[in-house]
Amino acid sequence: MTVVAAPLRTAPRRGLLLAPVVLALTILAGTAIGETRLPFITVLQTLANQLWEAGYPVDRIDAGIIWSYRLPRAIVAACCGAGLALTGVVLQALLRNPLADPYLMGLSAGASTGAVLVTVAGVGGGAVSMSLGALGGALLAFGCVVVLAHAVSGGAGGGRATQAAAAIILAGIAGSQMFNALTAFVIARSANAEQARGIMFWLMGNLSGVRWEDVASCSLVSIAGVGLCIWHRRGLDAFSFGADGAASLGINVPALRGSLITATAIMVGVLVSKVGAIGFVGLVVPHAMRFLVGARHDRLVPASALAGAVFLVAADVISRVIVPGQVLPIGVVTALVGAPAFALILVRGARR
């Protein structure tokens, strides 16, 4: 038994050691590849100059593209990919629904509405930032979904917990449509043609405006989200038996569900305010990782965060190089890749 158990114990440790290396290589690739072709040695020299003052002779324009544009963009893409994948893990576990993700729950739609109200309609009179507006919109959407779900299910609990979870999904769909319509109304009412074009591009996912000041907030919420999910990994595992089963195992179901979904709303609000609404990350990545590492959240959480980061950085690179001279919204790429991947996952799951 010792010979068999040793590899099982060392496998997660090897994964933890390899994860930073994979993440660093992914960010480096996102920094090296872009609209303008730059020699890889120039990328390494620029990073060495900025990090360790190496003194290599590098053209100032090339150095600016690498350090001020591509590197923060790659870091924010990695943070957003990890955060969005984690929201899918949390929502799918708590609701026991494989289709649960921030979009289905209306969180992304609410965050988009809050951001548009601040930037276009001028809500807050300039005293409210775009991030705060998106956060408020996500929390408002979450509150509306909870109230509607409670009304639909009649306060279902106990043996009717499954019915309550299904009501949340249906309420999320209704809330998402409502906030999407509200966003479109605000744009049509308050934005000029140029603003409307820019906002619609941003709503489909846009990393072009990301700078170093955005790295801190995105990194903070993503790292905090990983830590929170790992801290509550046993509670998330308990939800695989349903809310009633989790309660019988000693889990405070209302407190855990409320705190994790609220944290998810905060994470979605911050990330959407920086990069817009990006779909399929929270839906596809958790399913793919369950095939690879299983359903236990001590492995699923870090694996999904890493895979989400790699997936979104790769999608961002593709969005910049697939059409010469033009940058596509990153949401287009994630949908083109994510939709067939999710269909494949559904077919394989049905066959199994």
Image: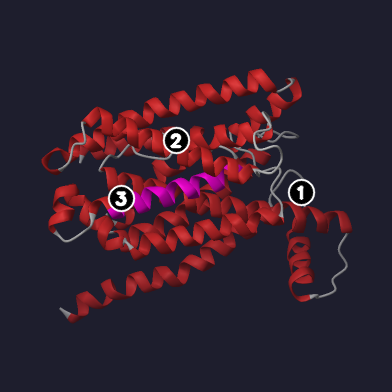
Hey, what amino acid is under mark 3?
A: Arg
Q: Is residue 334 magenta?
A: no
Mark 1 secondary-structure assignment: loop
Q: Residue at x 74, y 51 (%)?
A: 69
Whole-number angstrom distance, CA of label 1 to CA of label 3: 47 Å
The local secondary structure at tag 2 comes to helix
Nearer-N-terminus badge (3/2) = 2
Q: Quadrant of residue 204?
A: top right
Say which residue appears at 33% left-offset and 70% top-offset: 11
Which of the image's four quarters has the C terminus? top left
Residue type, numbered disc 1: Arg
**Does the CB distance between marks 3 and 2 fall below 8 Å?**
no
Q: How is the image coloured?
A: secondary structure
Question: For the residue carrying disc 1, how many other residues have a C-alpha within 10 Å: few (<14), some (14-19), or many (20+)?
Answer: few
Residue wearing tag 1 = 37
**In this image, 88 relative to 324: left or right?**
left
Please state which amino acid type lies under the numbered disc 2.
Ala
From the viewer's side, name the closer residue of 114 and 287: 114
x and y percentages locating residue 195 in the rendered image: 72, 27
Q: CA distance from mark 2 to mark 1?
A: 42 Å
> Which residue in the protein does label 3 denote?
257
Return the x and y of residue 26 as percentages of the image width and height: 57, 57
Q: Earlier in the sequence, mark 1 or mark 3?
A: 1
The quadrant in which residue 60 appears is: bottom right
Residue 2's place in the image compared with 346, above or below, is: below
The residue segment tinted magenta is 255-274
108 lies left or right of 286: right
The answer to whether residue 39 is seen in the rendering is no
Residue at the disc numbered 2: 141
Query: In this rendering, would 168 be left or right of 60?
Result: left
